[in-house]
Each structure stands twice: as structure tokens, then as C-alpha cells.
Image: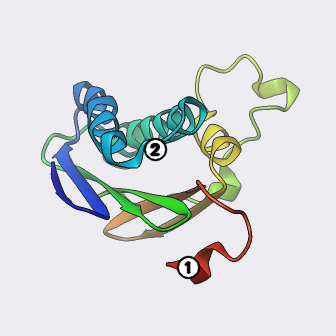
Amino acid sequence: MTSKQDQFNLRFQSVPENISKVEPFLEDVNKHLQLNEVEFHKLLVATTEAVNNAIMHGNKSKPEKSVTVALYIRKNYIIVSVCDEGGGFDPEQIPNPLEEENLLKESGRGLFLMQTLMDEVEIHANDTGCEVRMSLYTGPKSGLKDNQ
């Protein structure tokens, strides 16, 4: 893990065992952030889901590929960026996990969880990879992005 006061980074091989690196990384970051229990839980679950998707779906668990997690601290919000080296995806093609035919499926809830837990979720994909960028507001809710 590398860090500056307002940015923390983690990069690792794209193997399922490395999902376990997310929680200790975020716990270290939270020593600086001092998030409350609810905010930390939202951050942990959403980031873990994004990393899981990056490893399993984006990079197809290929160890020669990497996943990068970057966390940026701003005045009233946190940005988490999770990047893989896969081909990307169209979020509109992901089935709604709340529709009856999808309720019992074992997968397909990660993006839904990210969108439910975080205040903003953006997906940027191209031929060389995919970035899931999530924001969690931690302060006053108005004019946040103006206070960077």
C-alpha cells in the first residue's frame, strides 16, 4: 500500500484470494478517515464487491493481470476507484437482481449493492480495462464537489 495524506493505493494480482486484501487496506485507511461504523461498512461492502467483479469478471482470475484500488479523500466525500485490465462491460446489460426471475440467482448483485450503498457509481470501460468509480459523501450534502 502506498499513500499520501489524501490518496491511498493498493495493487495486486488478479486472483480470488486477494479479495481478502480489501478489508485490511480499508481499515488502515480508516485510521486516517475516522468513518463511523455505517460509513465504513458501506465503503467496505461496495469496494469488496467492485474488487470481486474486477478479479472474477473483468480479469477472469488471470494472475498475470492486476487490480488497482485507489481511494481519494476530499473535504466532504471519498472517491474509490477500482480498475481491472479486462474488456469492460455495459451496465445496462446486467439483469435487475430484484426481478422475480433473478431473485434466486447466486450472482448479479454486486453492481446493485454498489449503487445502493454508495452515493455515486460511475463505470468507465475501454479495450484496456474497466474502472468503477464510487463516491461516498461524508459531510454536508450540498455543493460537495465545489469543496475539493
For the point 67% across and 53% down, the residue is 93
For the point 55% across and 79% down, the residue is 147
Residue type at mark 2 is Ala
Q: Position of residue 128 (x, y in %)?
A: 31, 69
Quarter occupied by residue 88: bottom left
Question: Relative to 30, is 65 above or below?
Answer: below
Judging by the rendered image, the residue that carries numbered circle 1 is 147
Q: Is residue 88 visible?
A: no
Q: Is residue 56 left or right of residue 36?
A: left
Residue type at mark 1 is Asn
In-front residue for pair 30/57: 30
Few, some or many C-alpha atoms within 10 Å of disc 1 (few <14, some 14-19, many ≥20)? few
Question: Relative to 5, is 69 above or below?
Answer: above
Single out the residue that lies furthest toward the right: 100
| Mark number, residue 50 | 2
Q: Are marks 2 and 1 in contact (CB under 8 Å)?
A: no
Q: Position of residue 58 (x, y in %)?
A: 38, 49
Q: Position of residue 34 (x, y in %)?
A: 43, 42
Q: Is residue 95 left or right of residue 72?
A: right
In-front residue for pair 67/38: 38
